[in-house]
Image: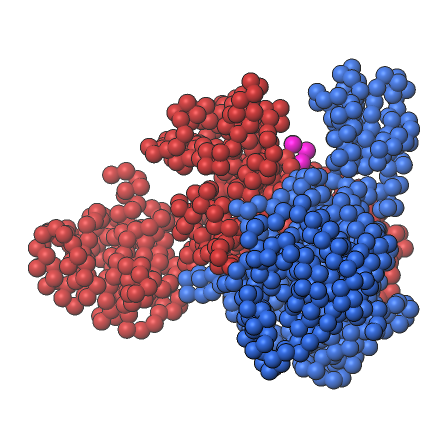
Chain colours: A red, B blue
């Protein structure tokens, strides 16, 4: 048995032991299903009482007692009839047995506990290190995942081969919780979620709107310098355009319902592509005009089930840093190379030094010619090979309309986040009959590339917050510094400091309110303001400031020196 | 009879004479209605043939012949029965007679033409100066304005007391046509209208997107410097929020139909207010925090009938330069004063020196207290009086929820365009239960001001284009200058020039394509590029450029001198 299968069967066995323990505690409990999952296991129960997180250690304790007993997991084949008899008090199991097509079913017996189960399991509970698992949380879960069925209580546990692995995992979880962008977003007053506005939608507070603007301004400069032109398109469009694009037929499950306007139907946009294509098509294009690159910060709306929504990283409305590139066949290699290099450069600027690249190639069903696919896939591989980039190939994993490269960034605690997609498209140029006039004077189909580098600005801000645990680098911090007077006699001097810093281009706030200095410093640290500049008698006399960064005193600076230092920090974007 | 009534009856009489002429030409024609309108008149006909614009002079000629005949307009009262007999061949008139409630009806007889008409009319056609009217255009118009009825042919005419007035009017029309922002938008490649995208929606071409960005960037700086904070809110929201705000009940006719999302309904936003209010309410606000000013470039969608849509000035989707201000009672005068002064300053910056101000006061039905209304109306009048501004009072013309000031800007050919609304609102703070903690520690309702200065960025760009006939001032021009080499030997030098200008912050394009210099200059003039910088042997040797502006040679400049000059022009924003 390989390592993965071994740990899975151990986790699965732990779920049985948990059910065993729960049934001992609540003999009237009905049991649902209890599989192994990533990092652990769960089991669903229909309980006569409502559990609290504080009940979990009690269950854990019982499980540990069971483990000590060296309980064997015995596999047995029985007829469906026998099984129904064995589980006569377990209605959910009986339902499962009824639905099984086989004549015989497999059960596992361990001590007084029997479960309907295909296995595999460990041989005996003694194989489990009873310090290497932990019950972590409770959740509600519908029987068989359907809202029509009763809501059961799911108990989650995590389990590893060794205690050290468990400890690592728990520490990592704790770290991730501290970095949870949903909490940071609210604590740092960046964005607002509100039940009355709707799930998966956010309003950006002033500080969040500044962060959004800093990112947009940076991308605007970066892309404009590389030949991108900007487009602004509406958020709704007649259904006709989505029929032409194919979204209406192939993407319906993510579309919001149409709005009736006079005798026409309109959709809120899930994508910006058709609008960019319309601009392309508003003129006759020549081979001399290529490549044509249109970019837009396009806010799109896509339906996601409410159950999967999560902060800024899984939403119903988001702003793509979207662009479309149309080029000639002889430009395809260079254009995809530029794209990928630019993406990696941008991630480095944002502080992500490690990226993972995934190339997805031609699936079984596809549009376009084999020659076109070959050319496109080669173009994507060209730069990967030329720049000696490490990448994974997902053979046959491309969309039906073209091959693609995905980029995931690795954050400071090792988690991967999907951001970039660079996607070649053989479908839309065909559907919208896009052409350019080639050197021979004939109409030719351009190659079309969709790409979003950060992917979604909302999601990317979520990733940034988690990566930096809210301690954004100076160039990204919505409030870069606070000027804090020690006493009321220093207010005037603090105001001069704040104004000079603002004039020097910094986002500096004067904090001359009534609170004490120490309270202001505490507030500034909670708000993760990069620099707190405290001025008292000494600083006022010496015309200096005292700078604090991440809770540490950085010493006294002449204002000019501090400005120089901060400017360098911003320019380095570190 | 006053002047207005006199000219109206003359215009009305001309519509009868037009119908007289048309019936002479097409005896089988059926006539609809023919009133006097602003600047002229029209008449609707059901014709056996389809008219072309080239037919209008023929009708005009017959009208002039009739005018010469000294035809009297005789009023007569007849019974409905008699009237039905007189109009026995005129089905539309018979329908009108049937619908009349009076027993007697009035008819007007002039020569062989009789019309069902209340009048008044002139006494005789000789009162008309036959050179002071002109038939201008044809249009389709449903009988009684309903799509269920037949489509009639409407002939429009314009008419004035004197030929000179007509000439003035026609010249003005011609001027307005040249300035039509819809044509300019397409000619200068600023924005795109497309049947498949939908009526009243626009996609901004790259050049238009730059113009939009210049305006946004300017307002962002201007407002940020005046204590505004920026918000970004979604384009959809749960119906609940629109029920709380009252839009669902009172503004339904302008709302798009709801989208069903799981078991909830969402609306595309017609306004940004509820989102800004939610941000206000996300914290407890103190009297020390006031005023709170939130701004947003919020793109909203409102239903307008397709018949009233017009270019960028009457649309279905537009971006408000929206802001909301909440303040204490003692701040209201100063806040409204700041607002109004800022609005006037901004219009001056955009080149509108003359504005008209309209104050609308308490209507019969209203929410809020008399005291509140008094205070609010005084606040609006405070600055009007203090700054000795000329303004019109629309007594009782305020919305039910508060008094307002509207600002119309006067363009370079004297037309007025509605832009700004500064609106005090007693309704939303109540509906959303907005409060702040006052100096005594009690909850108090803030005053709330809505305001959009430019109103709609789309509409304002339309107004700018019409005001400048497309010749945007240097700071607003998306492409400020073209560098044009005379021959291929000058390309390298032109490139250096273009790059230095770009480095100096100008939007400069290098035009080193294959066309001739004269063609490039012609193109640049059609595209209304402020400066065309031509470089040939002489300029290359002398390290200069030759600048052309609006078709005129401005002479030779050292590049440094030219940059200085252009910088000054941008800074003056003229």
Residue A411: % across, % down: 53, 43
Task: Give the magenta range.
Answer: A223-227
Check if residue A476 falls in the magenta segment.
no
The image quadrant where one finds the C terminus of chain A is top right
Horizontal arrangement in the rendering, residue A50 relative to residue B555 (left or right) = left
Residue A553, visible in the rendered structure: no
Q: Residue at x 86, y 54 (%)?
A: B164
The image quadrant where one finds the N terminus of chain A is top left
Image quarter of residue A277? top right
Residue placed most toward the observer, B303 or A253:
B303
Residue A567: % across, % down: 76, 42
Residue placed most toward the observer, A241 or A270:
A241
Q: Residue at x 71, y 74 (%)?
A: B75
Residue A216: % across, % down: 65, 45
Horizontal arrangement in the rendering, residue A557 relative to residue A364 (left or right) = right
The correct choice, above or below, for B277 with respect to B51 in the image is: below
Horizontal arrangement in the rendering, residue A282 relative to residue B571 (left or right) = left
Residue B510: % across, % down: 74, 27
Residue placed most toward the observer, B236 or A437:
A437
Q: Residue at x 84, y 33 (%)?
A: B551
Residue A432, visible in the rendered structure: yes
The correct choice, above or below, for A474 with respect to B100 in the image is: above
């Amino acid at each position: 048995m390989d390592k993965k299968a071994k740990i899975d069967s151990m986790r699965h066995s732990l779920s049985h032991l948990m059910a065993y323990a729960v049934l001992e505690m609540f003999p009237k409990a009905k049991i649902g299903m209890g599989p192994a999952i990533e990092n652990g296991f769960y089991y669903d129960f229909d309980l006569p009482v409502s559990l609290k997180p504080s009940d979990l250690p009690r269950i854990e304790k019982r499980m540990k007692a069971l483990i000590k007993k060296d309980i064997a997991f015995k596999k047995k084949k029985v007829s469906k009839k026998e099984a129904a008899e064995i589980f006569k008090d377990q209605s959910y199991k009986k339902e499962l047995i009824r639905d099984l097509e086989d004549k015989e079913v497999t059960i596992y017996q361990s001590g007084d506990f029997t479960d309907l189960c295909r296995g595999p399991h460990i041989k005996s509970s003694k194989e489990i290190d009873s310090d290497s698992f932990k019950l972590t949380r409770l959740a509600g879960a519908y029987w068989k995942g359907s809202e029509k069925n009763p809501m059961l209580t799911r108990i989650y546990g995590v389990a590893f081969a060794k205690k050290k692995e468990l400890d690592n995992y728990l520490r990592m979880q704790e770290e991730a919780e501290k970095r949870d962008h949903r909490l940071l977003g609210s604590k740092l007053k960046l964005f607002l979620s509100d039940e009355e506005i709707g799930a998966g939608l956010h309003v950006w507070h002033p500080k969040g709107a500044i962060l959004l603007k800093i990112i947009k301004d940076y991308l605007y400069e970066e892309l404009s310098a590389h030949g991108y032109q900007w487009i602004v398109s509406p958020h709704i469009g007649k259904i006709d355009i989505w029929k032409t694009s194919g979204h209406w037929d192939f993407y319906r499950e993510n579309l919001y319902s149409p709005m009736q306007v006079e005798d026409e139907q309109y959709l809120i946009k899930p994508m910006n592509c058709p609008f960019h294509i319309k601009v392309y098509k508003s003129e006759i294009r020549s081979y001399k005009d290529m490549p044509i690159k249109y970019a837009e910060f396009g806010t799109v709306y896509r339906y996601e089930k409410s159950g999967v929504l999560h902060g800024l990283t899984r939403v119903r409305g988001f702003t793509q840093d979207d662009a479309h590139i149309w080029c000639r066949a002889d430009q395809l290699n260079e254009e995809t190379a530029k794209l990928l290099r630019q993406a990696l450069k941008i991630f480095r600027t944002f502080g992500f030094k490690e990226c993972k690249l995934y190339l997805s190639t031609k699936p079984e069903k596809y549009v376009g010619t084999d020659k076109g696919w070959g050319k496109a896939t080669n173009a994507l591989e060209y730069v990967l090979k030329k720049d000696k980039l490490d990448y994974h190939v997902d053979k046959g994993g491309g969309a039906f309309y073209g091959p693609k490269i995905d980029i995931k960034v690795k954050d400071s605690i090792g988690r991967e986040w999907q951001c970039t997609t660079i996607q070649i498209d053989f479908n839309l140029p065909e559907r919208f009959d896009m052409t350019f006039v080639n050197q021979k004077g004939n109409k030719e189909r351009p190659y079309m590339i969709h790409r979003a580098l950060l992917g979604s600005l909302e999601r990317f801000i979520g990733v940034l917050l988690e990566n930096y645990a809210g301690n954004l680098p100076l160039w990204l911090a919505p409030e870069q510094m606070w000027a804090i007077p020690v006493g009321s006699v220093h207010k005037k001097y603090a105001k001069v400091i704040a104004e000079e810093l603002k004039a020097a281009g910094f986002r500096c706030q004067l904090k001359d309110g009534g609170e004490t200095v120490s309270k202001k410093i505490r507030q500034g640290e909670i708000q993760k303001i990069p620099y707190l500049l405290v001025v008292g008698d000494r600083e006022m006399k010496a015309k200096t400031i005292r700078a604090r960064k991440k809770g540490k005193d950085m010493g006294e600076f002449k204002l000019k020196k501090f400005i120089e230092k901060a400017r360098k920090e911003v320019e380095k974007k570190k």
